[in-house]
């Protein structure tokens, strides 16, 4: 519910035109339906009579939901939510902050208004300088590596691993001091590196963090699921919002840790996350997951019996493509690792729904789905996460429809977002007439890293070198930039590992619906092994790909296990597949 006293407008042509026509600065409020301090500011600062009068008479107020407009949030976030940003009528930033209490807010409103009226020429000159610099750099501060610089190498992975080890909190797990965020990608990298090196320090980082988080206040021991982050170093006092994205990340890492480390506590936590998602965020039998559950400190302070007497916090019933893709990915893993096939069924229905309802040829998939239909097409994060989930669905199910969809989305992303000049993918399609900062496109590290991983996975499945080349150019673009991200570059390091390491490929040739084919596939997926790529090639549906890859169909389903161009004899016994996979990997190490 928007604060009633403010005449809020939406981000759009009308609001910006009014700002130019009335020659008023814009007050941009970036909020979230789950955000506690956003609700506090709405109920205090924005309900203050004097502040409301100042806003309605001297500013053009615009409200943006951060989940629905990550592209706007990326350009204008001032360090958290709520974001309170003051802009020129062209969308350039004058000043910004996060939460502002009423007295301070009133003072800021007056000062910004006076500054804008009295310093017009200075502001105009500064804006022109900023725009000129952006035009000269294409809107990007970073560039590709220069000739002679260090290429992609294990040094990248080692650098990020050292950041993880240096940031690790030996007393309470996790990274850094407070506030403390889970940093799931850092844990994923630590787990993958432990699997390769058996470095006990890395194992302790993962286990200590996962155990401390599940025992702390950041975890809801009553209803299940994780809150977004902890305000304290020891995980004891959380911010109480629960996000689909975060719980998808948690589910995936707890499953991986359980599979590799055989930690029973990780299995219990994974099952409990599933309990929460199934009860509170699952959208129904048609597929999909809701976006988030609101922060409500009073509710979560109640004991279990008292909670039964009170309505649970509200849920945002928006379906976000990238978050749904993340949870579908985790559900598919959970189905295989925990032996719960019903989870895979819902995951595949979710992916099918996203494709049918958000994909449009020439645009890619939209960012979110509401009753009015799909909204905001073409963002990189949605394409990347859905491609990654489709490839996972293809590997887990053997159904070639998901491989075909992944390839189709790659084509869309390359058409709309690929930077042929410097490499890498922009975060949104080109729109020279876009409003404010949206005129300038960004290249986010995390989403580009995931696109590189997807391209590399496609290259293993197709043996097409152009996918490897695009992945290499994407990763090289960030060689100068990744060190400043510290542990936040963990996803990039995982992509570099994928690029540097040859995988073991398991190609199962057989009719997808044949139980013998599915038995071979299940055996090929057994155990934690990121360097393994498995696929089913159905002679009835994938004849052209069979010819391209050179695998021969047999009288019964068979598995070909290959490494660096060398293939073992065709396998018909499922139990022989993991043995052969490990034999190849041991030979390589």
Image: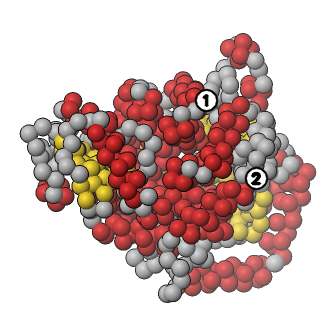
Residue 265 — which label? Answer: 1
Image-based side of 68 in relation to 24, left or right: left
Relative depth, front residue between 282 and 231 = 231
Residue 76 against residue 479 in the figure, above or below: above
Image-based side of 360 in relation to 135, left or right: left
Residue 450 visible somewhere in the drawing = yes
- The quarter holding residue 576 reads top left
Residue under the image location 62 percent in, 59 percent down = 161
Give the residue pinned by disc 2.
176
**Dot 2 crowding, Cα within 10 Å, few <14, some 14–19, many 20+:** some
Relative depth, front residue between 554 and 201 = 201
Residue 293 against residue 388 in the figure, above or below: above
Q: Are marks 1 and 2 in contact (CB under 8 Å)?
A: no
Can you give x and y, in whole percent of width and height, for residue 199 in the image?
A: 60, 52
Residue under the image location 87 percent in, 65 percent down = 111
Residue 483 against residue 63 in the figure, above or below: below
Residue situated furthest left in the rendering: 555
Residue 378 visible somewhere in the drawing = no
- The quarter holding residue 557 reads top left
- The quarter holding residue 265 reads top right
Residue under the image location 51 percent in, 26 percent down = 278
Q: What element carries label 2?
A: loop
- Quick one: quadrant of the C terminus? bottom left
Can you give x and y, in whole percent of width and height, for residue 102 in the image?
A: 87, 48
The answer to which of marks 1 and 2 sits earlier in the sequence is 2
Residue 374 — which label? Answer: none
Q: Is mark 1 on a helix, strand or loop?
A: helix
């Amino acid at each position: 519910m928007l604060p009633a006293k403010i005449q809020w407008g939406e981000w759009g042509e009308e609001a910006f035109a009014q700002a130019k026509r009335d020659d008023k600065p814009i007050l941009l409020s970036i909020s979230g339906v789950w955000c506690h301090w956003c609700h506090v500011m709405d109920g205090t600062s924005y309900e203050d009579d004097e502040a409301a009068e100042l806003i309605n008479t001297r500013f053009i107020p615009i409200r943006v939901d951060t989940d629905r407009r990550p592209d706007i949030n990326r350009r204008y976030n001032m360090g958290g939510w709520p974001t309170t940003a003051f802009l020129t009528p062209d969308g350039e930033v004058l000043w910004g902050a996060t939460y502002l209490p009423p007295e301070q807010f009133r003072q800021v409103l007056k000062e910004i208004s006076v500054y804008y009226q009295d310093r017009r020429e200075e502001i105009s000159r500064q804006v022109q300088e900023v725009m000129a610099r952006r035009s000269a750099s294409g809107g990007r501060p970073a560039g590709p590596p220069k000739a002679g610089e260090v290429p992609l190498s294990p040094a990248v992975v080692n650098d990020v691993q050292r950041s993880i080890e240096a940031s690790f909190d030996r007393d309470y797990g996790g990274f850094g001091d407070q506030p403390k965020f889970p940093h799931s990608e850092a844990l994923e990298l630590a787990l993958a590196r432990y699997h390769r090196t058996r470095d006990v320090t890395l194992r302790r980082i993962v286990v200590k963090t996962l155990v401390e988080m599940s025992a702390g206040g950041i975890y809801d021991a009553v209803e299940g699921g994780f809150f977004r982050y902890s305000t304290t170093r020891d995980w004891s006092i959380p911010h109480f919002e629960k996000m689909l994205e975060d719980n998808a990340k948690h589910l995936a890492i707890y499953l991986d840790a359980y599979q590799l480390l055989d930690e029973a506590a990780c299995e219990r936590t994974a099952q409990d996350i599933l309990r929460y998602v199934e009860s509170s965020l699952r959208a129904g039998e048609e597929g999909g997951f809701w976006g988030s559950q609101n922060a409500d400190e009073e509710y979560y302070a109640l004991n279990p019996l008292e909670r039964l007497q009170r309505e649970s916090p509200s849920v945002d019933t928006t379906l976000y493509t990238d978050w749904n893709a993340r949870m579908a990915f985790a559900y598919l893993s959970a189905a295989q690792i925990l032996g719960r096939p019903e989870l895979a069924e819902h995951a595949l229905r979710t992916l099918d729904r996203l494709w049918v309802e958000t994909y449009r040829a020439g645009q890619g998939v939209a960012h979110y789905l509401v009753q009015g239909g799909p909204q905001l097409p073409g963002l990189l994060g949605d394409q990347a996460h859905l491609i990654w989930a489709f490839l996972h669905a293809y590997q887990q199910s053997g159904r070639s429809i998901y491989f075909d969809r992944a390839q189709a989305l790659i084509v869309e992303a390359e058409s709309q977002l690929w930077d042929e000049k410097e490499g890498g993918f922009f975060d949104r399609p080109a729109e020279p007439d876009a409003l404010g900062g949206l005129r300038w496109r960004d290249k986010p590290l995390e989403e580009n890293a995931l696109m590189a991983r997807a391209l590399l996975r496609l290259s293993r499945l197709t043996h097409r070198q152009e996918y490897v080349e695009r992945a290499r150019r994407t990763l090289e673009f960030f060689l100068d930039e990744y060190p400043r991200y510290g542990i936040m570059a963990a996803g990039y390091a995982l992509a570099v590992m994928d690029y540097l390491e040859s995988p073991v490929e398991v190609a199962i040739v057989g009719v997808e619906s044949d139980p013998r084919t599915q038995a071979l596939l299940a055996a090929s997926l057994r155990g934690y092994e990121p360097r393994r790529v498995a696929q089913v090639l159905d002679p009835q549906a994938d004849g052209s790909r069979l010819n391209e890859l050179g695998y021969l169909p047999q009288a019964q389903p068979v598995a070909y296990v290959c490494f660096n161009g060398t293939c073992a004899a065709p396998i018909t016994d499922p139990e022989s597949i993991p043995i052969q996979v490990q034999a190849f990997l041991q030979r390589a190490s």
